[in-house]
Image (cartoon, rainbow, N blue to C red):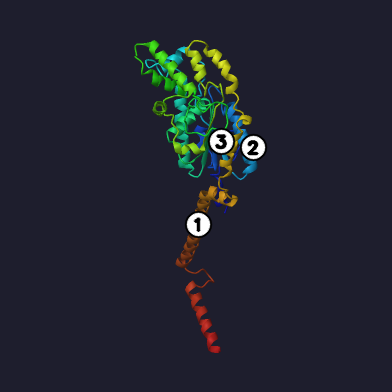
Amino acid sequence: MMILIATAATPLRAEADTGWSATPVASSRASTLDCAQLLFVGVRGSGEQTPYGTTISAFQQQLASQTQKNRPDLSVHQVYLDYPAAALDQLNLDSIEDMVLPNGSASASPYFGSVDAGVSELERLASSESARCPNQKLLVAGFSQGAEVVTRAVASGKLDGSTLGVVLLGNPLHYEGQNVNELDGSASNRAYGLTSALYFLRSQAGSAPASDRQAQVQKLLTTLFSMYAGTVDTSALNSAMSSVGATIPGEDAPHTWSVCMSDDSVCDSSGALSRLLTSTSTVQQERDRTRAPHESYTPANLAKTLDAVQAKIDAQPVQHPATAVAAKHFPLLVVGIGVAVVIVAGAVILGLRRRVARNQTGPTLGQQPASVEFGDALDDEQAAQDDQ
């Protein structure tokens, strides 16, 4: 029995890194956690510190508080996406023009390399967790650059049916007609995020002669006006977004929520880009102008989105404690039973060997052989029957 207990206890993992109150684990270490019913993945914005940054931390805390009241039975783990989240310090007017003009480089800023790294890591995490914990659901929330990372990962189709919900706050890849639910936010649904606008402008500027920079700039301004007025060529826009992997599939729309605040040039960039490309403003002035709205994605401004996500969480099936414990420790139970069977079998074999050994060596002094004892017992039984 002591061997059975020691063997069954050895594989148990510590429970310190579990639940809403635990410190989030880096996505690269997600496999060290036991499977849960819900895995929350937070993706921070540009230049923010791990694990989540300010905005996602506040969103997560609000969800945690409500879930602990509504569904205290729900098992939850948390991870933060392990990626660079490069700051936008090197983004200036020259790099913006270089990104949107056809003869420039669309990868002028380290930002895009950071996004690519984040997309790869999120896709890897989703695939790994789906295979490791097939009954576990993913809830992914991204802010700013993190929202762009999440958008592209969802668009790739790598976040499969295990995804419970997706939340995009201040998304640089926001655009008109995107397959998302917009319940909060003050920006129009015609708002264009900074990177979606740059990608679309670049695709449209290509229709002007490559040698005529002035004509290209004029095309950019015309396109910007159409974006602001809501008269964009929808087919051209959809084609441009598809070419850069920004199209969220229709089947993901019911569980994807996006929030954009007016004048947040990260997700509502038309005005800022118009001022920059006409030299009526500087990059620093636009940064100063957008700081307040970009920092306004607080729980108080996300009430409807939080309620919608919470409803998804609350609707998850209840996993009864006995079932949960049995499922979690079933491999250990199998190992324990196996050890017990080995111990019992060993004892039986050892006993048989000892009996065989005694019979082979013959009786000791004062002891009859087993066969003689058995024969005497039969004679005694027959004598009793004769007396009757």
Residue type for callout 2: Ser
Mark 3 in CB contact with mark 2 (< 8 angstroms) = no
* In this rendering, position of residue 209 left or right of residue 194: left
Q: What element carries label 1?
A: helix
Q: Is residue 91 above or below residue 366?
A: above
Of the numbered discs 3 and 1, the one sitting upstream in the chain is: 3
Q: Which residue is the site of mark 2? A: 65
Mark 3 in CB contact with mark 1 (< 8 angstroms) = no
Of the numbered discs 3 and 2, the one sitting upstream in the chain is: 2
Measured Cα–Cα span from mark 3 to mark 1: 39 Å
Instruction: Categorize mark 3 by other alpha carbons within 10 Å: few (<14), some (14-19), many (20+).
Output: many
Residue at (42, 22) in percent of width and height: 200
Question: Of residues 274 and 307, which is closer to you in this image?
Answer: 274
The numbered mark at residue 78 is 3
Name the spot of residue 24 as percent of width and height, x first.
Answer: 57, 33
Measured Cα–Cα span from mark 3 to mark 2: 14 Å
Q: What element carries label 3?
A: strand
The numbered mark at residue 164 is none
Residue type for callout 1: Val
Name the spot of residue 371 as percent of width and height, x first.
Answer: 47, 74
- Which quadrant holds the N terminus? bottom right
Of the numbered discs 2 and 1, the one sitting upstream in the chain is: 2
Residue type for callout 3: Gln
Q: Which residue is the site of mark 1? A: 341
* Residue 88 appears in the figure: no
